[in-house]
């Protein structure tokens, strides 16, 4: 309910099984969905709410994915674009796990190196490797630095 007593708050249905990604910065749900590969011809049942009233942030986005529990590398990717997100695992309508997201100190196979000559950009079967240094990500092979707009480098 809104502060003025008006019942205008958008409600999306609870889900039976799956993942709810909550507390996404308002307007960034679509980036989260792109990272999870659920834009386009997905078979999954996905609900999205944008600009929902929130106590902690003034507005937030929420993404609910039925029958899918996110893998660790997917959570790492979400951390890069939605550092305040909460991941809720739902089983039989209950929240069985709730965790924040943390950018891990080392990201393997998550970011594409901006250096076209980097060994991780060749035909060698070598996944990219980045080490976080503050807000910068440094390539473990060629020392290339991603210092801004990290999300645009997500593979
Ligand atoms: N949720 C859902 N389906 C369920 C259970 C929960 O879609 N069967 C959603 C809720 O709508 C909410 C999120 O999962 O967006 C977390 O649920 P819950 O922990 O019950 O809500 P809060 O206590 O408000 O969460 P928080 O403290 O993290 O803000």
Image (tube, rainbow, N blue to C red):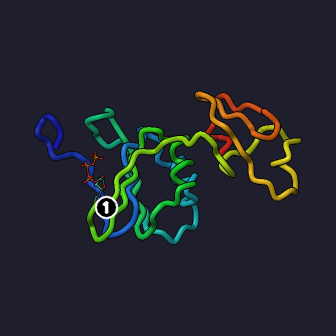
User: What residue is shown at x 37% (from left), y 43% (from top)?
Assistant: 23
Mark 1 sits near ligand 1, with its Cβ under 8 Å away:
no
Q: In the rendered view, does 109 fall on the left or right side of 45?
A: right
Q: In the rendered view, does 52 fall on the left or right side of 27?
A: left
Q: How many marks?
A: 1
Residue 52, position as x, y percentages in the image: 32, 43
- Disc 1 marks which residue? 96
User: What residue is shown at x 29% (from left), y 60% (from top)?
Assistant: 95
Residue 24, position as x, y percentages in the image: 42, 43
Q: In the rendered view, does 72 fall on the left or right side of 3?
A: right
User: What residue is shown at x 54% (from left), y 41% (from top)?
Assistant: 103
* Residue 22 seen in this snapshot: yes
Q: In the rendered view, does 14 fall on the left or right side of 62?
A: left
Front residue of 89 and 104: 104
Front residue of 101 and 40: 101
Residue 11 image-quadrant placement: bottom left
Residue 107 image-quadrant placement: top right
Residue 108, position as x, y percentages in the image: 67, 49
Residue 19, position as x, y percentages in the image: 40, 60
Quadrant the N terminus occupies: top left
User: What residue is shown at x 37% (from left), y 48% (from top)?
Assistant: 22
Residue 134 image-quadrant placement: top right
Front residue of 120 and 85: 120
Q: As drawn, which residue projects farthest toward the left?
A: 5
């Amino acid at each position: 309910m809104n502060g003025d007593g008006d019942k205008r708050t958008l409600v999306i249905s609870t889900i039976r099984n799956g993942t709810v990604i909550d507390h996404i910065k308002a307007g960034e749900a679509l980036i989260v969905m792109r990272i999870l590969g659920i834009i386009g011809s997905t078979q999954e049942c996905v609900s999205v709410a944008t600009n929902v009233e929130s106590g902690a942030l003034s507005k937030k986005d929420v993404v609910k994915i039925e029958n899918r529990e996110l893998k660790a590398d997917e959570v790492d990717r979400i951390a890069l674009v939605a550092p305040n997100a909460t991941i809720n695992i739902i089983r039989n309508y209950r929240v069985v796990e709730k965790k924040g997201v943390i950018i891990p100190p080392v990201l393997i196979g998550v970011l594409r190196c901006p250096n076209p000559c980097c060994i991780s950009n060749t035909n060698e079967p070598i996944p990219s490797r980045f080490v976080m240094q503050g807000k910068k990500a440094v390539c473990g092979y060629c020392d290339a630095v991603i210092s801004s707009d990290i999300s645009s480098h997500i593979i």
